[in-house]
Image (cartoon, helix red, strand yellow):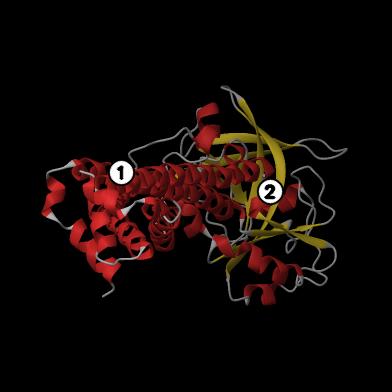
Amino acid sequence: MSFPLYFSRKIALSKDNKNNLSRVIIFIGRLSVALGIIVSLITVSTGFGSKKAIKERLADFSGHITIKSTRSNSSYNTSVLDNNGLELNKIKALPDVQSVQKYAMVTGIMRNEHNFAGVIFKGVGKDFDSLRFKKFLIAGTTPKITEQGYNNGITISQKVANDLHLKVKDSIVTIFSKTDQKPVYRKFEVVGIYKTDIKMIDDQFVIGDINQVRKIQDMKPDEAGGIDIFLDNVNDIDAVFPDVEKLIGYKNYAEKATEKYPQITDWISIFDTNIALIIIIMLIVVVINIIMVLLILIIERTNSIGLLKTLGASNGQIRATFINYTLIIMVPGLLYGNLIGIGLLLLQKFLGIIRLNPENYYVSTVPVDLNPVAIISISLGILLISGLALIIPSYLISKISPVKAIKYN
């Protein structure tokens, strides 16, 4: 064991520290490190957790990647997907693709004696991933689609249900307009109510039978307005997207879930800036406190520094001793900070103590993403940066004269 490391451990574990100024200084240093770790862990875990939760909600509702016809305009009435060059079986065979489902959409107005609501009727087929959608259900179920005949069951959002005073098993009339033709009236039965917490979805979308849309839009029985592609992981969208684009034909285009609602994407991107800013601020606070601890410890142990120099220790060895000493002081702060920070995050993850307004944050509780790599990186990063930051102030030791230091008390 090297002399600096050995001596730094001896003075760090010395009982003398319990009876002098070192006790207060060590406490302040450890407290600042612990608070830095706690705030950093909460910031990173909730920030990344919110980003991931919002992306997953968008993707689980409308597909991680969606294929549409290039003839689709800005309206929500889908154009017929072109099958030329569309290699659906190859898309299904891609390693990261979990499932695909066809759909077609048409806009309409639901009305009853209580109110009316403009809706987007998303017709799904027998390949609809009802298990994935189940997490959004708060009452009832989704329509059982067989694509044989016409299923009149629909699943509506809680927002639409509240506006129209609807509950499961109620009926509702919906009006669909067609260009240069009379409006089409359809009567549906509410079989389920869902809630995604994403306003742009909950305000508009209704899930029903794709054959209803085909009939209204004069589509053929095997035609669709688009295809939703679901992946194993929301983080794989950018990697899989180029492979999907090669298999969709020239008259169709692919769209990422994160591109469908640019206002949400822009809002999510703010998390990266906020996380970086808070981490930088906490690093600065921790580093300043640790530097102050080092300087006070050097001043307090001036007599010891003079004695070490007299015994032949070099300035480099003494500097290394005090840097190691300060880093050893930080270790309990790192441990307690991680224990408290991870404990608080686990409480939030499983109990959902802190709640949010979904109209502003797109989630009803603060999401938590406990990534082991991020947790370890925060601790190691603070320890490493603090160690580097201590190098320059430690040069104060070289200015101390052995003769004057021994007399100093």
What whole-number distance in Å separates the C-alpha atoms at marks 1 and 2? Answer: 56 Å
The residue at 56%/60% (across/down) is: 234
User: Circle 1 sits in a helix, a strand or a loop, which is it?
Assistant: helix
Q: Which residue bears the numbered disc 1?
A: 296
Please tell me which of labels 1 and 2 falls first in the chain.
2
Decide if residue 56 is on the left or right side of residue 138.
right
Please name whichever residue, 226 or 48, is drawn nearer the observer in this view of the structure: 48
The image position of residue 86, as x and y in percent, is 77, 70
In this rendering, the label closer to the viewer, 1 or 2: 1
- Mark 2 falls on what kind of element? helix
The residue shown at (82%, 47%) is 73
Q: Label 2: few (<14), some or many (≥20) within 10 Å?
A: some
* Residue situated in front as seen by the camera: 384 or 143: 384
Q: Residue furthest top?
A: 114
In the image, is 28 to the left or to the right of 291? left
User: Mark 2 belongs to which amino acid?
Assistant: Lys
**Callout 1, which amino acid?**
Ile
Q: Give residue 117's position: percent from left, percent from top.
A: 63, 30
Q: Which residue is mark 2?
A: 260
Q: Residue at x 37, y 61 (%)?
A: 315
Residue visible at 43% across and 63% down in the picture? 373
The residue lying toward the viewer, choosing from 373 and 195, is 373
Q: Where in the figure is residue 2, as x and y percent of width and height?
A: 29, 73
Instruction: Locate residue 143 relative to residue 69 in the image: left or right.
Output: left
Asked where in the image residue 352 lies, by quadrant, the reply is top left
Observer able to see residue 207: yes
Q: On the rendered structure, is 358 left or right of 70?
A: left
User: Relative to residue 401, is residue 115 depicted above or below?
Assistant: above
Residue 140 visible? The answer is no
> Which residue sits furthest right?
180
Q: Quadrant of the C terminus?
A: top left
